[in-house]
Image (tube, rainbow, N blue to C red):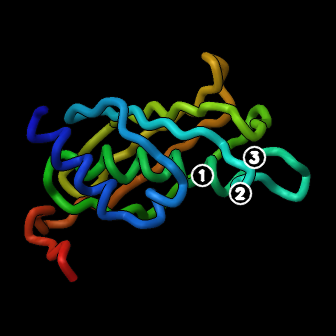
């Protein structure tokens, strides 16, 4: 397993919310990531479809993981999500995140969510790139 994948997996395992949502790492490199989750009954809305919040959580997790994979702490400062198709309990949702642009202090990411190859939502996010090293964060606290 690569050092980058090990770091990403450790970050996901250290996040109780991500664990509660069943989000799993499929792939990561320095510019992109792929995460997946299966919609559960606990993630449905009062309309009986997948709650938009669980889809946002999947996209936001892919965004955060991808933006931090270079090892510098990057924090979200703006996001936008468009929901295109509904999802149901049992659907396997795939988030594909990629870096769109990067400057010294900010970076922009796009995340597309898919169900069986069909786009169900799109997400864009901007991060502020700090001067902190990700490895300096105390994960035992």
Residue drawn 63% across the image and 18% down it: 116
The relative height of residue 91 versus residue 109 in the rendered view (above or below) is above
- Position of the C terminus by quadrant: bottom left
Q: Residue furthest right?
A: 47
Residue drawn 21% across the image and 62% down it: 73
Find residue 124 and report its horizontal and vertical position in percent.
Answer: 51, 44
The relative height of residue 15 versus residue 7 in the rendered view (above or below) is below
Q: Nearer the viewer, mark 3 or mark 1?
A: 3
Answer with the quarter of the image where residue 2 lies: top left
Residue drawn 66% across the image and 57% down it: 53
Badge 3: residue crowd in 10 Å (few <14, some 14–19, many ≥20): many
**From mark 3 to mark 1, how far is it between C-alphas?**
11 Å
* Left or right of 17, for residue 118: right
Answer with the quarter of the image where residue 121 lies: top right
**From mark 2 to mark 3, how far is it between C-alphas?**
9 Å
Residue that badge 1 annotates:
56
Q: Residue furthest bottom?
A: 141
Q: How many marks?
A: 3
Residue that badge 3 annotates:
50
**From mark 2 to mark 1, how far is it between C-alphas?**
15 Å
* Left or right of 85, for residue 6: left
Q: Nearer the viewer, mark 2 or mark 1?
A: 2
Do labels 2 and 1 touch, CB within 8 Å?
no
Give the structural element (helix, strand or loop) at label 3. Answer: loop
Q: Which mark is residue 42?
A: 2
- Position of the N terminus by quadrant: top left
Do labels 3 and 1 touch, CB within 8 Å?
no
Do labels 2 and 3 touch, CB within 8 Å?
no
**Sequence order check, earlier mark of 2 and 3:** 2
Give the structural element (helix, strand or loop) at label 2. Answer: helix
Find residue 38 and report its horizontal and vertical position in percent.
Answer: 60, 39
* Left or right of 6, for residue 63: right
């Amino acid at each position: 397993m690569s050092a980058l994948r090990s770091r990403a997996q450790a970050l996901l395992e250290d996040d109780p919310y991500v664990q509660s949502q069943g989000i799993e790492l499929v792939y990561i490199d320095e510019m992109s990531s792929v995460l997946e989750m299966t919609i559960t009954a606990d993630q449905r809305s009062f309309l009986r479809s997948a709650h938009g919040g669980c889809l946002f959580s999947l996209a936001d997790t892919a965004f955060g993981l991808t933006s931090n994979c270079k090892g510098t702490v990057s924090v979200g400062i703006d996001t936008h999500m468009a929901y295109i198709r509904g999802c149901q309990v049992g659907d396997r949702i795939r988030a594909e995140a990629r870096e769109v642009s990067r400057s010294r202090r900010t970076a922009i990411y796009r995340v597309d969510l898919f169900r069986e190859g069909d786009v169900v939502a799109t997400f864009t996010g901007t991060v502020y790139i700090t001067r902190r090293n990700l490895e300096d964060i105390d994960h035992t606290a």
